[in-house]
Amino acid sequence: MLPYATAAEAEAALGRAMTPFEALWFRYTAGVSDYHLYCCNILFLFAVFTLAPLPVALLELRAPAAVSLYKLQPRVRLTRAEFVRCYKDVLRIFFLVIGPLQLVSYPAVKMVGIHTRLPLPSLGEMAAQLLVYFLVEDYLNYWIHRLLHGEWGYQKIHRVHHEFTAPIGFAAPYAHWAEVLILGIPSFVGPAIAPGHMITFWLWIILRQVEAIETHSGFDFPFTPTKYIPFYGGAEYHDYHHYVGGQSQSNFASVFTYCDYLYGTDRGYRFHKAYLAKLKDLGQNDGGKGDDNGLNYEKLD
């Protein structure tokens, strides 16, 4: 809760006039406790889980021919019932695990220094902190994910997430409850190292979930803005990991590709890409009779 009774008091404390965004923040949060502001994460997560995967899901269900060119595993067609089942299972984990965890984790958020006070962070400050959050989460997630592909971790926990060998956006958070808890830790380490404003924390949670949904979408659209992010994995990169399945020892990174490259866990993927490129060249050389859809993993069958 902001320690100012009026806007004039806030501006006196700042030593300047509030910006329009700061005035908006003051107007809507001055009488709201920090705990309630933190709990807004639950609403944001629910909205992202529900709305972000919806456009691609509707296209796949209602106009599959229009997007088949961009589908990474075009032979796999999920039914509407399978989409609904996935969404219901994710909601069950949301209400039984993620929601309660959000409600009880506020003391840790307060302890590391995430705050709601004025002034609001600049765009540069937010961008720098978000970069730290993504890099830290990506590195820690890589090693946890890799451990979960050990025999015990996969059979007891991680195999649930791999039930979707051709992932969909709704399946991004589809996992065993223990995996949801374990992989939630890396998401918090970054903000603990470089704590910032609650707005930055909100944005981090939203962006991380949108990224996970995009990489699990099952489609590689050429106009995706993330294609311009250096070392970004994306849907094709992670889709290969799901296609290979439980035996996969490749493409463990959640966001970027540098960990897989440094530790040699992208060799299978790079070999696969080279093989597809060779098939494409052969198809062009024989007059186009070959299968030149480089996004179709099933050419390995």
Image (tube, helix red, strand yellow):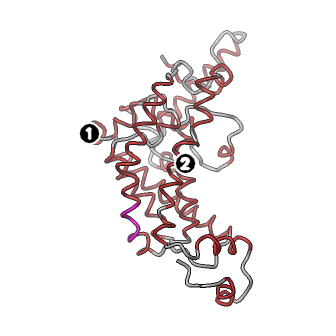
Left or right relative to 267: residue 103:
left
Q: Which residues are magenta?
A: 103-108
- Numbered disc in front, either 2 or 1: 2
| Residue 262 or residue 175, whichever sits in front | 175
The residue tagged 2 is 47
Q: Identify which amino acid the numbered label 2 is placed on.
A: Ala
Residue 40 sits above or below residue 84 on the image: below
Left or right relative to 171: residue 199:
right
Is 66 one of the magenta-colored residues?
no
Q: Position of residue 236 (x, y in %)?
A: 57, 35
For residue 100, which quarter of the picture?
bottom left
Q: Position of residue 164 (x, y in %)?
A: 43, 30
Structural distance between the alpha carbons of marks 2 and 1? 30 Å
The residue tagged 1 is 156
Our reading of the magenta stretch's main secondary structure is: helix
Dot 2: few (<14), some (14–19), or many (≥20) neighbours within 10 Å? few
* First-in-chain label (2 vs 1): 2
Q: Position of residue 182 (x, y in %)?
A: 35, 52
Residue in the image at 47% along x and 62% along y: 39
Residue in the image at 54% along x and 54% along y: 44
Is 106 one of the magenta-colored residues?
yes
Q: Identify which amino acid the numbered label 1 is placed on.
A: Lys
